[in-house]
Image (spheres, rainbow, N blue to C red):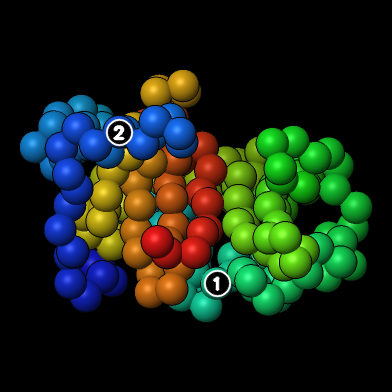
Amino acid sequence: MNVKKGLLVGATAVGLTLSGAGVTTVSAADDVQGTSVSGVHSSITNQEAAEYVNAIYDSAYSGKMPREAHDLKMNKSSKKAVHERLGEPQETEGGFDLYGWEMGNAGYGFAYNKDNTISEIRNFGTGVERQKNLGGITPAVLNEQFGSADKILAVPQTNEMDYVYNTGKYELHFVVGGDNTADHVNLKEAK
């Protein structure tokens, strides 16, 4: 087992609802982990996905995402720097400049602070051979690579689960869909 987290900080408060955000915190006693883990891939059977998720995790400590966005940093890089690096966004939706995946490159979304520096980076993985990146990331792979999530949030509007890992000044939110694989991962400033 390759558990990267030092201390596994306490799980969550049972039944805490953040009504403004539409997110519910679930305790480890709830049957979320048990349901999510059955019949899923592990990193042993999906080494490329495990390598990808480790690159995301390692980059998060410095407020960055790997690969195409590796030189763009949270609260430092400007919207202009994002546009210079990745071009004009393909669309803007929900406060994010969105960049679609092309020829094996991951898709990204960027939200900005009032001073136009990056406030959040969203990684959508690739569309082709998705099982080799985010499509190969399940709660079992996350648990195997990093240990238990610091908290697990339910997203009622989408029936997704949000596995949150603290990486110092930042946190990673692995949003897992109904197919039990990561739909996307968000890098945010730690609260």
Q: Is residue 39 left or right of residue 125?
A: left
Q: Quadrant of the N terminus?
A: bottom left
Q: CA distance from mark 2 to mark 1?
A: 27 Å
Q: Which residue is mark 1?
A: 63
Secondary structure, mark 1, is loop
Task: Identify the residue at horizontal 68%, vertical 60% (top origin).
Answer: 113
For label 2, the crowd category at 10 Å Cα-Cα, with few meaning under 14, some 14 to 19 and many 20 or more, is some
Task: Identify the residue at horizontal 40%, vertical 61% (top origin).
Answer: 191
Which kind of residue does numbered mark 2 sit on? Thr
In front here: 142 or 95? 95
Q: Is residue 45 visible?
A: no
Q: Which residue is mark 2?
A: 17
In front here: 8 or 78? 78
Task: Identify the residue at horizontal 26%, vertical 56% (top origin).
Answer: 150
Task: Identify the residue at horizontal 44%, vertical 57% (top origin).
Answer: 172
Q: Where's residue 142, x and y in %? A: 32, 52
Q: Where's residue 175, x and y in %? A: 44, 40
Which kind of residue does numbered mark 1 sit on? Gly
Q: Is residue 66 left or right of residue 188?
A: right
Secondary structure, mark 2, is strand
Q: Quadrant of residue 36?
A: top left
Depicted 78 relative to depicted 88: above or below = below
